[in-house]
Image: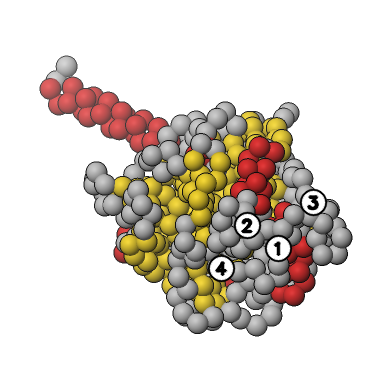
Amino acid sequence: MPDDRRARQRTGAGVGLLLTLALAAVLLTALPRDHHGEGGGTCTARTVREWSPDAKLTDSFAAYGDDETRTDDWTGGDGTHSVRLPDGRVLWLFSDTYLGRVYAPPNPVGESYAWRDTAAPLVRNSAVVMRDGHPRLTLPAPLFPDPGPNAWRWPVAARVEPRSPGSAESVVRVLLWTRTAGPYPWIYGVPAATEVATLSLPDLRVESIVKVFGQELVQDPSQRVQFGTTSVVVGDWTYVFGGNDAQAAARPTSSAYVARVRVGLLGEPDAWEFWDGSAWTARAGPRPVLGDGQHTGVGSAFSVVRDGGTYVLFTMAAGSRGLTTVTSYWACSPVGPWHGPTRSFGPPLPPGQVAAYNPQAHPELGGDRLVLSYDVNWLDATATSAALNLSRNVSLYRPRFVTLRLGPPPR
């Protein structure tokens, strides 16, 4: 065979091999993202297969709130985020919090509820330290001072991370929502910005507070996004989820957004990247990853965990069930596509005109089941009615807990 013919055959075989490899790459990249989760692991459909009330954990916070050993500590609050510290303690973070004293029943109108005086101190945030499964100590409250007149800070997700990438020293980073007083219907305040506080370890002293995402220049408050309702660490990245208040009354028809930050850099504004619908970008122009405004969406506070290679999101259900029912979505990537809603369930609620909200997962509590908290409030959110009813029955404004088992949807 002439040399030039053999050369042409070798060239043809090389081109064929390259085309085969290229075609395989195209086929692999064309596979749906639902085959493998971002960060590794097999991604499969997930839903709530079983759930049950966690009376032990619910009762532990009730007992702590009723304890009269101190009169400057926590007696009730909402928000209910947690983070496990390196020494085994669990730090619980709450938004609006009642301090003061709790009185044994009957209350002033003869009902069999423990109660507090309507003049009980109310602070915008608090932190409770848990040891050995029981709340033990309320840090001086508020832990995070108000940023100005008619403005306040609500703590949301928290993470223990290196002080800087690669550092041997750890700190606690707490995401904060700053909000300002506004006219009706903004009864929960107008979103203003997302901040990050750094707490030293082990003494939990606030070292600094840095604004990482300002929204004051967005004219329509319903389009302002606040990050930190939940976070998930995968590899070198912390994925931080957030939402808007598409309806001021916080019904679950808001949209979910996601940002990411290198581990160790949560408190560095320039390190944040936002999902813009097609790519991660340092420009502050995030686009929703979940929510059509009607049938799918989230409350302004929701939670995300990672189960194997699958991301699972918990929120109150859309529509009229959003006051009583928790539902979930799943995805193989923090940016979606998100599937669902899947199976829903109605956690126990006390009698009266009450609503459940803010389902938050607490994977750091361990075990083979996932702990999920939810908050309960009086349905009429006008200031006078809420204060009166939350005072005459202190159990309305304390976290309640359920445990879940996740699995594939039933066939």
Which scheme is used to colour this image of the protein?
A: secondary structure
Nearer to us of marks 3 and 1 is 1
Q: Nearer the viewer, residue 287 or 52?
A: 52
The answer to which of marks 3 and 4 sits earlier in the sequence is: 4
**Residue that numbered label 1 is attached to:** 116
Give the numbered dot on residue 75.
2
- Contact between marks 1 and 2 (CB within 8 A): the answer is yes
Identify the mark nearer the N-term, 3 or 1: 1
Judge whether residue 101 can be spotted in this image: yes
Q: Report the residue at 64% width, 32% height from top.
A: 405
Q: Compared with residue 239, is residue 118 higher up or lower down, i.e. above or below?
A: below
Residue most extreme to the right: 110
Looking at the image, tell me whether mark 2 or mark 3 is earlier in sequence order: 2
Whether tag 3 and tag 1 are in contact, CB under 8 A, the answer is no
Label 2: how many Cα within 10 Å (few below 14, some 14–19, many 20+): many
Image-based side of 27 in relation to 9, left or right:
right
Q: Quadrant of the N terminus?
A: top left
**On residue 350, which mark appears?**
3
Tag 4 residue: 123
